[in-house]
Amino acid sequence: SVQNGQDLRSPICCIMGHVDAGKTKILDCIRGTNVQEGEAGGITQQIGATYLPAENIRERTKGLKADAKLNVPGLLVIDTPGHESFTKLRSRGSGLCDIAVLVVDIMHGLEPQTIESLNLLKMGNTDFVIALNKVDRLYGWKTFRNAPIGKAIRQQSKDVMSEFNRRLTEIITQFKEQGLNTELYYKNKEMGETYNIVPTSAISGEGIPDLLLLLVQWTQKTMITRLTYSEKVQCTVLDIKAIEGHGTTIDVVLVNGVLHEGDQIVVCGMQEPIVTSIRALLTPHPMRELRVKGTYLPHKEIKAAQCIKIAAQELEHAIAGASLYVVGPNDDIEAIKKSTVEY
Ligand code: GTP
Ligand code: MG
Ligand code: NA
């Protein structure tokens, strides 16, 4: 889509937070999927990626009557594990994104990996919003399925409201102890200095419209330069997987630029850089998780930002976390091979 003659790419949004805060479940609620229940032990162990087209976001946020003008084509969301052993994957996810959602369980407040995630975001100077999740667990919570959070909170009993306010105040204090000002997003008068809190339930969907709208409106308002599409390919390998009918494939996030079927690419390999050609460019269906086996859509070319599965020869020894390079007609392959660094 075009704004001021500029071509904006989809913002990349990374979901972070402590184990079991509800990161994957929030994405399940948005997608209408059941990825979380299929995870071993209910624990995410890989980085995930899902493309949310603007029309799905528009549909999901229309209850907010914000008359939202969406200037971005969609939102690319990256799911990360919260378990303590996956610091590297959280770091990789936060390094890829334009904005993050820090998910906090309202019943638990800030936990060790909440703080670790917070520190990664601070180090990367990455903007974020806070999803204060599991509001449905407040004792006596009345469900208003997929409702805007303001509407849902206004209709709770006095007891639920005071319990909500007590926990919210406590969590705002915990953030203050980490050096951050935070406030409910609809009360926030200092956007940009005070971080926004969006209460959510991943089970009954309250607040999910607010979260989506805030992410899109905030990024397209404050990150126009950063989100302006650029031709230069910027692409990161997330995973290496064998897929029936396609052999070994790599899952990648294309942050900028365009990939074509047949492009010659260079990726970091275990022994040496791998030079190969894209045999197939595949994406999961929109609103479907890349890391979950499913049916894939073939493309002749794909423009950023997108999550993509690439089939090619020689990918068996590719290394996750490294950049993917496209060899242009005037490029020196040897120079590109030298720039593939192992992460
Ligand atoms: P990791 O990826 O393993 O770090 O966990 P996660 O943050 O992705 O949390 P996950 O989506 O796996 O959810 C953890 C548990 O909390 C699951 O049993 C979910 O059903 C539950 N859960 C998540 N969100 C909510 C919520 O909003 N309300 C309630 N009641 N339960 C939730
Ligand atoms: Mg998860
Ligand atoms: Na979990």
Image: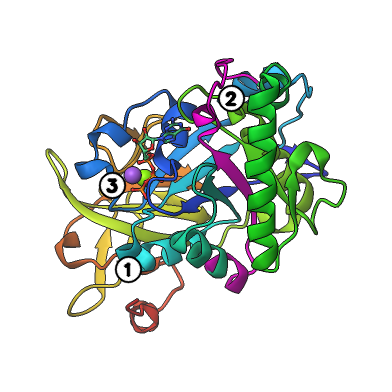
Above or below, 248 against 106 in this view is below
- In the figure, is residue 144 to the left or right of 68? left
Residue 171 is at least partly visible in this image: yes
Chain part drawn in magenta: 120-147
Q: Write down the residue under mark 2.
A: 206
Q: Amino acid at mark 1?
A: Val
Name the mark nearer the viewer: 1 or 2.
2
Image x and y of residue 290, in percent = 34, 41
Ligand 1 within 8 angstroms of badge 2 C-beta:
no
Disc with the residue nearer the chain's start (3 vs 1): 3
Residues marked 1 and 2 touching at CB (< 8 Å): no
Q: Residue at x 86, y 52 (%)?
A: 190
Q: Write down the residue under mark 1.
A: 266
Q: Is residue 215 magenta?
A: no
Q: Amino acid at mark 3?
A: Ile
- In the figure, is residue 194 to the left or right of 166? right
Q: Secondary structure at mark 3?
A: loop
Q: Write down the residue under mark 3.
A: 43
Looking at this view, is 78 or 207 the one in front? Answer: 207
Above or below, 283 against 149 in this view is below
Looking at this view, is 325 or 127 the one in front? Answer: 127
Looking at this view, is 208 or 160 the one in front? Answer: 160
Q: How is the image coloured?
A: rainbow
Image x and y of residue 248, in percent = 16, 52
Q: Quadrant of residue 84?
A: bottom left
Q: Marks 3 and 2, Cα distance to the nearest angstrom?
A: 23 Å
Q: Quadrant of ligand 1?
A: top left
- In the figure, is residue 259 to the left or right of 66? left
